[in-house]
Image: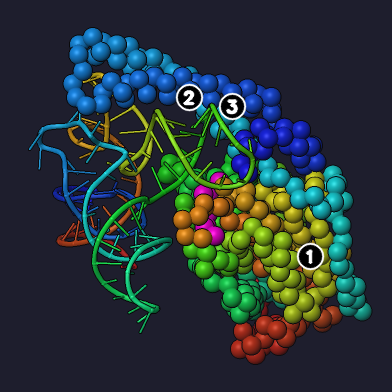
Amino acid sequence: MTPIQRIRDDPGKVREMLAARDFDAPLERILELDKVVRELKARKETLQAERNKASRGGPPSEAVKARMREVGDQVRTIDGELATAESELDERLLWIPNEIHPKVPRGKDEHDNVVVRQDKPKTLGFEPKPHWEFGERLGILDIQRGTKLSGSRFYALRGAGAALQRALITWMIDLKIAEGFTEIYPPSVTKRETLLGSAHLPHFDENLYRDEDDDVWLVPTAEPQLVGLHRDEILDLATLPRRYVAFTPCYRREHMSAGRDVRGIKRVHWFDKVEMVVHCLPEDSPKWLDRMTELAVEVVEKLELPVRVTERCTGDLGFTALRGFDVDAWGPAANEWLEVSSASNCGSFQAERSNIRFRREAGGKAEHVHILNASGVALPRLMIAILENYQHEDGSLEIPKAVRPYLGGRDCVRVGEFSL
RNA sequence: GGGGAGGUCGCAUAGCCAGGUCGAGUGCGGUGGUUUGCUAAACCACUACAGCGGGUUAUUCCGCUGUCGCGGGUUCGAAUCCCGCCCUCCCCGCCA
């Protein structure tokens, strides 16, 4: 159901949803605009019906022409009012978040998320160094020069550090391909329309980089591209579920989090991510949420890193999600759980905005698909977890067994191999 | 960047140059039916979507409006004329 349908249908329910998400929207104003728009349309259509009738069949008399000139003027007047009301209505509706699944735990922010699973943090037997210190000493992470090149919150990987990340990307994509996902390599630059479809616009607006001249935007994740792939399409039932995996760079301005996580590479303006998106039948989306969460967990587990899975509460759910889980890896030096993936069931929300449908049977009515996304997973935090869990006291880094085949068999990065 | 062609109902096309029952013809595909031992073929019918209103509210139904890449304009009336934009194809140039 689209936002306006939901509001007409049960404004109280929408109000509850807004409160649960700690969001605000002028529902009264929206209902008023909706009413105005409908009335104006009704009046306009009556006039148009009269005009169509008169112009059917051939040249009308001068008297009729004169009358129709009047009708035309009236239509133009209504069009003006309609444009004003409709644009305000449309704009306001874009700011209505998705519904909330009834099972979602209520809560204010991430502190109220519910732990579903939590491994024991690994102990190293010595005091682990933070990833930035460890990585720079080993010569595989160069934050200073990244900053020199591009500013704060940028970094460069060096030598085996760069190779490790590249290996992780390939390995993670291969895991998804083995699960039946199709790899996509989409542009990392996109259009306004695509971002409106995935609902990154308008509410994520201030976190996005853009080029004003050409109205092109840098993607904050591959999600808008993997959703937008099927914009304005009716998907063949036999091709569902559509499972996609993509690697892209991701760009975020992070103006909202200025001052937070400033050290290291936990929160940066540009990072790499492997992302999954599934378009499926509505009845299958709960199952896919679980499955995609498992696929994110799989990555962390195969790297033999401690895993935590939490279910996001109402206040931390995000604009587009009905329900979602976060997957974290433990960082022993950071002494915190690092969010490496966020899995969301967006239901029909993005499919409605992107006009993506399917038919259950030939000639049947087209229904919106359900769309889900999950990171599979984000690289910087995975790199942090590896640097912190696999460091040795002598300053060398062990390479997790799972990615060794992707690094020509390399099992460690020795001290002295690389230097900044 | 310069020049040319073009974007029409799932696909392919007609209609545009001479504006008026053109929301739109034809072929293919699809759906239903007739015929048939079965299949094929043939024949017949149907075959976009959205919004609003009415009847029913389980499905079916009726009326109106809009949509011929998108947005404007001209006109009593636009798929058809004019302007802007987007996209595709071809040729030339330039850069990789």
- Residue at point 73% right, 82% down? A400
* Residue A333: percent from left, percent from top: 84, 67
Q: Which callout, 1 or 2, points to the residue nearer the camera?
A: 2
- Whether residue A189 is visible to the viewer of this picture, yes or no, is no
Tell me the SS state at disc 2.
helix
Disc 2 to disc 3, how far (Cα)?
11 Å
Q: Pointer 1: what residue? A: A328
Same chain under badges 2 and 3? The reply is: yes
| Residue A140 drawn above or below residue A414 | above
Under mark 1, the amino acid is Asp
Label 3 sits on what residue type? Asp
Secondary structure at badge 1 equals strand
Please report the residue visible at 62 percent of the width from the left and 48 percent of the height from the top: A349
Please provide percent x and percent y for residue B36.
Answer: 33, 75
Q: Rounded to the nearest whole Å, what is the CA distance between mark 1 and mark 2?
A: 51 Å
Q: Which mark is residue A41?
A: 2
Residue B79, image x, y percentages: 26, 37
- The segment highlighted magenta reads A353-360
The image quadrant of residue A396 is bottom right
Residue A25 appears at what percent x and percent y? 70, 31
Q: Is residue A202 left or right of residue A113?
A: left
Q: Answer yes or no: do the residues labelled 1 and 2 have beta carbons within 8 Å?
A: no
Q: Earlier in the sequence, mark 1 or mark 2?
A: 2
Between B39 and B79, the residue placed more toward the observer is: B39
Q: Is A110 on the left or on the right of A161, as rendered?
A: right
Rendering quarter of residue A120: bottom right
What residue sits right under mark 3 in the picture? A34
Neighbours of disc 2 within 10 Å: few (<14), some (14-19), many (20+): some
Between A319 and B56, which is closer to the camera in this rendering?
B56
Give the SS element for disc 3: helix
